Amino acid sequence: MSDRRLQVFHTVAKLLSFTKAAETLHMTQPAVTFQVRQLEEQFNTRLFDRTHNRISLTEAGKKVFDYSGKIFELYAEMESSVRQMTGEISGVLSIGASTTIAEYMLPSLLGAFKLRFPDVSIQLKVSNSDGIVSMVENNTIDLGVVESPVGNKNLVVETCKTDHLVAIMEPNHPLAKKPTLGYGDLLQYPFICREEGSGTREVIADSFCTTGSNDWEMNISMELGSPEAVKGAVEAGMGVSIMSRATIRKELRLGTLIAVNLDPPMERPFSFVHQKHKFRQYAMEQLLEFAKEYCAEHQEGAGE
């Protein structure tokens, strides 16, 4: 039996989509369908039910999916074990990061990692914090990096650094000259925030609730899907916001934004998230150790 057929089937079963599987595997959809049909012929049974443009696993498909996951995990364990014996560090790692971590923290970290371990290939997926946790839960990625609390007790969460958030506004704003701002000061002005599911939005809401600042009663005027969009709106004088100080370094140098410290300070952890019982490749162990060292040396990080 071809390993490729099993790999294609496993990807389709995990994503429950031939189209998404084709994109993930860099194949055409007809090629994915052909591989799955060959596997079905091998077992002489259907592995998927196809109805109304949706697919689901048959009982036989569920059995094959379960065993294929164990097979690929054993393959990875065998490969990692042999490479560890020979001192070779290589392989493909799938990492997910929330939007701003991917934009402001990971490029330099992964660049430094690749210089040390050039034979390791890294695939990066970007989403908000909720999306990254979901990918870890579904085994879509090997490792997630997020900046909001993770409620799933079956996942391992390891804090790597602390991020500091500040209030931001355009230079001529009435709050721009103040040395510090209380949370209540920001309630008087239109507030520009990230979308639901964003780690930054969750941290801001939690901070307001825990300090008794009349709960989450910001005058939200805009919800935007990226840090760059939020900064652009604040620069245009459309409102105030709260962001990681490290994400606005360029704007502070150019003088297009003003950052004011919050009282009490608003902080959040950056955390690595991975499955508790999933086997980790040797390359992943090296990445985790490298990332912890890197974060310790670069404590002023950026967040979503």
Image: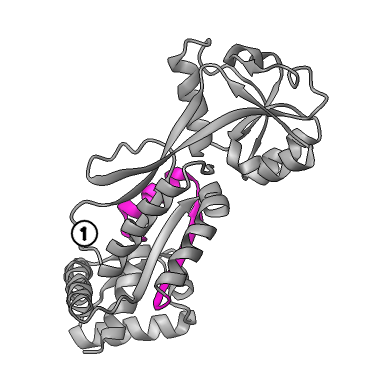
Q: Residue at x 73, y 18 (%)?
A: 175
Quadrant of the rendered image containing residue 21: bottom left
Give the colour scheme shown. one colour
Where does residue 114 sit, x and y in percent of width and height? 45, 70
Quadrant (top left, top right, bottom left, bottom right) of the N terminus: bottom left
Between 89 and 236, the residue placed more toward the observer is 89
Q: Is residue 177 above or below residue 116?
A: above
User: Magenta segment, which residues?
Assistant: 118-141
Q: Secondary structure at mark 1?
A: loop
Which quarter of the picture shows residue 38? bottom left
Residue at x 46% of width, y 53% of height? 97
In the rendered image of this protein, does residue 87 appear above or below residue 174? below
Name of the residue lying farthest toward the front: 297
Say whether residue 121 is magenta. Answer: yes
Residue drawn 25% across the image and 89% down it: 2
- Side of 282 where 125 appears, left or right: right
**Can you say which quadrant of the picture contains the C terminus?**
top right
Of residues 281 and 230, the one drawn nearer to the viewer in this rendering: 281
Query: Of residues 25 and 40, which is closer to you in this image?
Result: 25
Residue 257's image quarter? top right
- Residue 34 x, y percent position in the rendering: 38, 86
Q: Pointer 1: what residue? A: 278
Q: Residue at x 51, y 41 (%)?
A: 300
Q: Is residue 62 above or below residue 221?
A: below
x and y, in percent, of residue 173 in the image:
79, 22
Q: Tag 1: residue type?
A: Lys
